[in-house]
Image: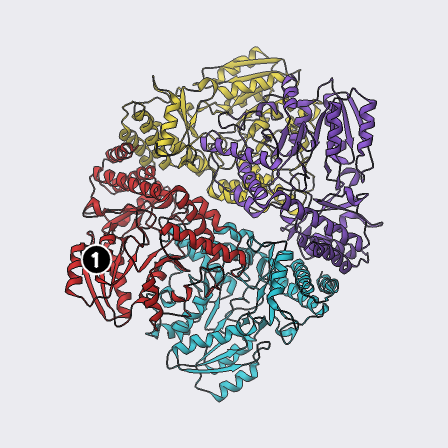
Chain colours: A purple, B yellow, C red, D cyan
Amino acid sequence: MRYSEHANPVITLTAGPVNCYPEVLRGLGRTVLYDYDPAFQLFYENVVGKAQKAMRLSSKPVILHGEPVLGLEAAAASLITPDDVVLNLVSGVYGKGFGYWAKRYSPHLLEIEVPYNEAIDPQAVADMLKAHPEITIVSVCHHDTPSGTINPIDEIGALVSAHGGYLIVDAVSSFAGMKTHPDDCKADIYVTGPGKCLGAPPALTILGVSERAWAKMKANKAAPRASMLSIVDWENAWSRDQPFPFTPAVAEINGLDAALDLYLNEGPEAVWARHALTAKAMRAGVVAMGLSIWAASDKIASPTTTSVRTPEGVDEKTIREAARSRYGVVFSSGRSETLGKLTRIGHMGPTAQPIYAIAALTAFGGALNAAGQKLAVGKGVEAAMAVIDADA
Amino acid sequence: MRYSEHANPVITLTAGPVNCYPEVLRGLGRTVLYDYDPAFQLFYENVVGKAQKAMRLSSKPVILHGEPVLGLEAAAASLITPDDVVLNLVSGVYGKGFGYWAKRYSPHLLEIEVPYNEAIDPQAVADMLKAHPEITIVSVCHHDTPSGTINPIDEIGALVSAHGGYLIVDAVSSFAGMKTHPDDCKADIYVTGPGKCLGAPPALTILGVSERAWAKMKANKAAPRASMLSIVDWENAWSRDQPFPFTPAVAEINGLDAALDLYLNEGPEAVWARHALTAKAMRAGVVAMGLSIWAASDKIASPTTTSVRTPEGVDEKTIREAARSRYGVVFSSGRSETLGKLTRIGHMGPTAQPIYAIAALTAFGGALNAAGQKLAVGKGVEAAMAVIDADA
Amino acid sequence: MRYSEHANPVITLTAGPVNCYPEVLRGLGRTVLYDYDPAFQLFYENVVGKAQKAMRLSSKPVILHGEPVLGLEAAAASLITPDDVVLNLVSGVYGKGFGYWAKRYSPHLLEIEVPYNEAIDPQAVADMLKAHPEITIVSVCHHDTPSGTINPIDEIGALVSAHGGYLIVDAVSSFAGMKTHPDDCKADIYVTGPGKCLGAPPALTILGVSERAWAKMKANKAAPRASMLSIVDWENAWSRDQPFPFTPAVAEINGLDAALDLYLNEGPEAVWARHALTAKAMRAGVVAMGLSIWAASDKIASPTTTSVRTPEGVDEKTIREAARSRYGVVFSSGRSETLGKLTRIGHMGPTAQPIYAIAALTAFGGALNAAGQKLAVGKGVEAAMAVIDADA
Amino acid sequence: MRYSEHANPVITLTAGPVNCYPEVLRGLGRTVLYDYDPAFQLFYENVVGKAQKAMRLSSKPVILHGEPVLGLEAAAASLITPDDVVLNLVSGVYGKGFGYWAKRYSPHLLEIEVPYNEAIDPQAVADMLKAHPEITIVSVCHHDTPSGTINPIDEIGALVSAHGGYLIVDAVSSFAGMKTHPDDCKADIYVTGPGKCLGAPPALTILGVSERAWAKMKANKAAPRASMLSIVDWENAWSRDQPFPFTPAVAEINGLDAALDLYLNEGPEAVWARHALTAKAMRAGVVAMGLSIWAASDKIASPTTTSVRTPEGVDEKTIREAARSRYGVVFSSGRSETLGKLTRIGHMGPTAQPIYAIAALTAFGGALNAAGQKLAVGKGVEAAMAVIDADA
């Protein structure tokens, strides 16, 4: 063992929290202003404006002051009523999990569930909506992070919109790492956060909310109010002229501001491109080493996380432990149903750079070889390099 | 106008968020580790250990990952059941507010309410407990920040304990600024946070929880679980060997670690002493200028915030605006019932230094004079100096 | 004693090093780039461009990578030859000190020396230049910091220019705190640095160099080359296309960039105004307490440092020690001839804010009273407030 | 081109300036104290004490406040007199360069010069010392950075000591990256700095000075005094009780303190080991790709920088440009005689981690392949991995 598990690793390549851009880390250290100070209120309005621009949204997004599970729970609590019929689309652990929240607020839950290495087929959604005209809300996880797979939310959103339903989208780990925006998928509540592809810490959630979602939530008397779970309390908090329902996470807003500046200044298309290229190089390298990508097809493989199927006979935990102790490189495990079956190699934000795919492949291959596999790491690297160089 | 309201002020003297210690601001910029990284899990355990030491607590405190309203709401949601009879002690806006949360979880709410510039009399509590043996839970705000007054929680706690009830204490803006600890007041749930006297940002809450409170909450099937509002989910999260229920606010934990180091290294008694001396100098100066302290007596005036009664005929908002625009100094207003009636001058954490009392008095007096008053600012300063020098 | 001399003070009000703007402290923590990296070379060119803009200079200034004594020594070593006749103008310790460097490079040194609380009279310079047509170089310290007095360099510069001489100006502690620029005084070498009114750390020096000074230095075979003391080696180093003679102080350049942004964004005139107002308030307060300003007249008193004459019978050191130990406020002593005779209260960069004049007056007055004086601190504060309010 | 030369690169692997440890970057942002503040004077003494411990030195080292060329120039200027006979040992560009400084102070210069990919043979030194008993000073560069080669300074130092001469050692880019200390080589002046293997910025130099070197410098009337080039002025500046000759670079001292803490806490032996392993992996990979190490033998190849000979027919500049534009990885060129003949891949401080050798090999190989070579990058990676794994 070279790297103690009690000392910081060398490179963190996880599915989040990710290490942050240095500019964001410095942003976190800005002066903490009083939340009622007019300078802070203006600053907050500007940060919301930058988030709106990044999300290409026609209305002001809402920032809630806890990590994205807050946004997802709050969305369920605020939008879903016992009269709603919810269709929850499940292609992974996180999609499945949303169903439990949905069920808390309505007894009427339908699900389409596919194997956790596949994506939802829009045709199945169309069929379900046709068969169940009573469906009022559809929920879907865009990037089911524990699987590293992407659902076709823009196609699904068009169907839900035509059906007249409300759409809740979990885009926490895809937004800012690929082309996805609330309006593109006609989301009514679109939940994301700064702790993944924006390269900031994980203590806020950002919601895109449609006009009709606002109306439905405000009409919902059971929607949380005077509560940490409230969305409606925050509707106008973006405005410099409005008080905050409770104290915003000032330092996190400072960090988010820096992250949004980086994203907008680099250019979203450029950011997406380096996520995509890093992922493509990763997959090429993984396959060339004789391993399998967890996602059933390249088309649904995430550009922000590459999930690699654990080879037969290998204890997945030993791979991550070896990668960390031998090379100082940290990966993520699966979660729940995918735990032990795959390793997740994140390339989000600052590590969405092809050179980190090389470091990842080498550490991952080396760790498997330490576990007795006989992988040709060099071949993996060369395959990844071929992808990178083809793009140069 | 010298200072634009859109530029940062020079000195922030508020009741929180306060500007942070520079060491904490730098702490916020530490590397963001993956929450499942063993180095982070050990670090988290150590931070909880430092919080335990600072709180002089026999058990591990719980950190929840949102500002202290989360801790208070979660405490109500987790501990209070419809069978409970809650006695809520009200000496200010925040105490009153807790009653609304309590009522959400039990219909049986009793209150003792005193004018918002007074403190709860322990004898009244004793009488009430005697008259209502059915009371199971008592809730009290230690420092009702919108009033700048302190309740005698240690005496109250002794009564509640003798009665056999559970005690919920809001010590958000008193802990670390004066001598107060969960065990001193026999609290069952003691809620504080880093954003006041610890001089860190406001995005976490720290709870001291007694053994029997754990038992009651775990037995409460309605207590939030799989929710942002859950306390019970986090019971063992302090341990390096246990997973987090959801992603902790990594950067805030980094900042909290720095804040706890500062507090423990300076020495709690020394920290309390400079809060107390700053407050004493403030009060002497305020009175010498011919103004009134909001608190009915010095004995109940907070050592962490000085609330000054707005003179007749003055619009309180104009005081704060003038202090900021003329001198670059920011104060807090009252809240709800106290709004307009008082100005709060905070001296918490890094600004709990006597020299800031001088800056505060001058800016406050100058702002009132700009509003047409004829205050002898020099006399105020001299009175404050006399207090400071008497302690030298 | 309240504040240990081994712990950081609360407020630093010195004549430099000053504590830095928080933005500058964060700037210092930016990524350290390789000096040959094209991104750094472009960045360096941009920083020089910002310095040029701040100095309102027609040519590129030169940054040398050590504190301003390097700039002053290098100027003497590079510009002065044994054939030069140098007129050194002395109104204080630093002006006197430059004469020793001048003498190292030429035996022909003339001086005009006035008492160290007065300023050079331009008429005396005119007379001297007339009497000594052989004078080729004139040197003057703009703000002789150990005295807190300002020399009329623009008038002096006009005379030197008419005479055809070269002018060396030490503007280290005046530039960016008042209206002064190399071209305004027709300086041939104008030496300043970031560690005073720009609110950055003290490890660089910035030189404005005239065309003819470049020509004279390059013609001087004894001018340092391949040396830390060289100016000529750095002539073209500002250009992204030119190599550095040796490694620049990358982190300091990062900090300087942040400081120049602050200065240019706030607006030089606004920055000068708050320095001037703070100084004016200081002086009014000092006089109202019954103390004397060191400078012979208000007209020559520095807007960036207020020097207060030590009252009879008081050991100056005890004042500073008491201010620090009782109130946590740090002042500067005099230097050499002025040591013990005055205390220097700096208001440079981030502390050039009137509210800090109040803190300074109080701590200074309190410290003197602790030494047995009977100063009316309140009167001092009120006099300062009157100045501040008159400007509101 | 993927990476603009005007945006920061992804990974900097140069021979210095290196990117700094994050802890050091944060250290640079600490409060800037007044240099005469007792807290700063104590801090400075402590930092010198940590440097002493890191250098395993019996006396206090001296910090000069400019990059290490200042230390080298000052050493020559202070120690060498016209009566001295200097033997300058030359195995590269930096060693050669010191001769020019030596010649400035004494006309009596002897040199042993070997090809710039070789190291000085101690036997040659022994022979020279025997042939020239008049030699009083020997100078040697430990790690001639532009070559990436190491001279046997401990053996050389023993010979010089036996001869009774003074030894000047340039250990700027070796100290803290391998086992080397002033006493190990019996150096009289040992020059290093924080900008290489300590992972801090390049604006200070640290000198180990022997008792007899102090005596010789102090006896040398021509040694710089009242000058940026002075060493003797700083002899006692380490003491909290002594004034500084001029203003120290406060922020850089803050950064150095953090760097020394990291070095001492990780453990020097552990730090050296990861430098050595990274270099060994680099060399194995380079050779396996069919390229040549510049150093004539592995034994003299630096553990802190790997210099790779430019293949025939390749313009070296295009390699570095391609590595940066394609992969975002920055390397160093050669200097003077070695410019164009080799590329320097640095692994100092934070990048002295084996996983960065993989990134370096891939980027370097990829860049050469982009220039038309046909390197087997995969073989290079596998060879490097074999080295790394053998050590696990």
Question: Where does the image place residue A59, in percent across and percent down from the top left?
Answer: 59, 28
- Residue at (37, 78) in percent of width and height: D81
Q: Is residue D302 visible?
A: no
Count up the numbered dots: 1
Above or below for B86 versus B246: above
Q: Is residue C96 visible?
A: yes
Outermost residue on the top side: it is B131
Quadrant containing the N terminus of chain C is top left
Question: Where does the image place residue C312, in percent across and percent down from the top left?
Answer: 18, 47
Q: Quadrant of residue D14?
A: bottom right
Q: Residues within 10 Å of mark 1 (few under 14, many from 20)?
A: many
Question: Where does the image place residue C315, in percent across and percent down from the top left?
Answer: 24, 49
The front one of D163 and A152 is: A152
> Would residue A149 be found to the left or right of residue B150 on screen?
right
Question: Where does the image place residue D233, in percent across and percent down from the top left?
Answer: 35, 65
Three-letter amino acid code at the position of disc 1: Leu
Outermost residue on the right side: it is A312
Q: Quadrant of residue C278?
A: top left
> Would residue A87 be found to the left or right of residue C97 on screen?
right
Above or below for C24 versus B131: below
Quadrant containing the C terminus of chain C is top left
The chain identifier of the residue carrying mark 1 reads: C
- Residue at (31, 44) in percent of width and height: C322
> Would residue C304 be found to the left or right of residue B88 on screen?
left
What kind of element bears circle 1? Answer: helix
Task: State the residue position of label 1.
Answer: C159
